[in-house]
Amino acid sequence: MSSLFTASLYGVVFGALALLALRDRAQARRALQVALKSFFSMLPIMLTVIGFIGLLLGLVPPDWIARYLGGEASIWATLGVLALGAVLYIASIVSVPLAGSLLRAGASVTTIAAFLTGLMMVGTLTLPLEIKYLGKRMALTRNALSLVFALIIAVVMGMILR
Amino acid sequence: MNDQLAPAPMSTPHNTLPQSPQEWMKVFRFVLLIAAIDLIGWLVAPGMFAPVARTTWDYLAEAIVILIPVAVLMGLFEVSMPKQLIGQYLGRESGWKGVALAFVFGALPTGPLYVAFPIAAMLLQKGARPLNVMVLLNAWAALKLPQLTVETQFLGPTFMLVRVALTIPATIAIGWLVEKFNRRQVSAPRAP
């Protein structure tokens, strides 16, 4: 989006890497190896979602997205998307570009924020695992409260942004 | 006095690369499928698939540009900060300092949320405050540094900042309420 942000991010990250290389060559090399590994492990899923975004935005008429996910859409659209986000398990590396593409195509801030926050904070698919480690009561209260607050965050964001 | 945390479940599972061409094929199967759809669509209906090609290309450029520094960020974190530290500091802290540390540790690039569950269980066993542990979990889920970077790129800095500004108090509220609801139970959570 903003090239200033990208430029400063590159500056900070690669500056830190250069500093590390000056101080400890072996560590810098290991950091670079981990970076390469992370990059290639993110690549397949990222390319998949980009391909999906391309098909979605290229083939679905933009006014459909605006109509079903936009400002005109009812509270039911927001609740539906929130529920979807809460149930699905999608890595943020995938969901964030997807959410961004829908927002640019005319979806409302509330809808997109509901989808994202629901996705991030509520984990229905990972709930069994969470219960195993934290116990039923704590896992359930955390997820239920996160769901409520995801909705609040989404509604407030819709009021603040535009 | 061994305050050490078990190191086992903390590595990110998807951090190994495919070894054989077959494995690479499997990893990229959805990419290949979409590429095939794009190609066939373009051959059959070039006019209809022109916007698909343009959108795909635009998003591809944007994604690669942001993925590179995010990957380097993860690499830097991996070598400069042992993950065990997270537990050690948080386990002993309390009050607002503990909450602040939980936010910082949660925001660090440390892999998906399910990695955090065993850490959370261990912290609770060691007597960490449930509020701090819940803040760690929700910050881990919603305020991750690499995620915020990608978010700034695709949704814009304003969206990201407003969401963070709202998520921080929400996270504290959730943690506080979870603690209230689990008063009796928190002394004996068990890590399997």
Image (cartoon, coloured by chain):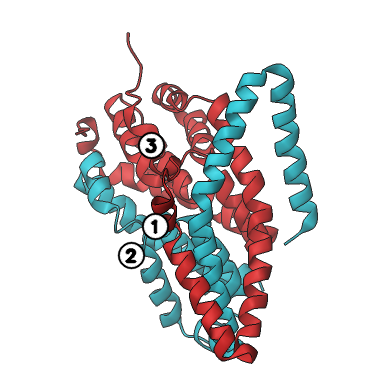
Mark closer to the observer (1, 3): 1
Mark closer to the observer (1, 2): 1
Q: CA distance from mark 1 to mark 3?
A: 37 Å
Query: Of residues B34 and A28, which is closer to you in this image?
Result: B34
Q: Which chain is cyan?
A: A
* Chain on which label 1 sits: B
Q: Earlier in the sequence, mark 1 or mark 3?
A: 1
Q: Which residue is mark 3?
A: B133
Residue A87 is labelled as 2
Q: Secondary structure at mark 2?
A: helix
Is disc 3 on the same chain as disc 2? no
Q: CA distance from mark 2 to mark 3?
A: 23 Å
Residue B151, position in %: x, y? Answer: 60, 57
* Tint of chain B: red
* Chain on which label 2 sits: A
Q: Is residue B161 left or right of residue A10?
A: left
Q: Residue at x 56, y 46 (%)?
A: A39
Q: Is residue B164 left or right of residue B179?
A: right
Kind of residue sitting beneath label 2? Val
Confirm whether residue A156 shows in the render.
no
Q: Which residue is mark 1?
A: B26
Category of crowding for the residue at label 3, using alpha-carbon neighbours closer than 10 angstroms: few (below 14), some (14–19), many (at least 20): many
Residue B163, position in %: x, y? Answer: 57, 58
Picture quarter with the N terminus of chain B: top left
Q: Secondary structure at mark 1?
A: helix
Kind of residue sitting beneath label 1? Lys
Residue A36 is labelled as none
Q: CA distance from mark 1 to mark 2?
A: 26 Å
Category of crowding for the residue at label 2, using alpha-carbon neighbours closer than 10 angstroms: few (below 14), some (14–19), many (at least 20): some
Q: Is residue B121 left or right of residue B92?
A: left
Residue A154, position in %: x, y? Answer: 51, 67
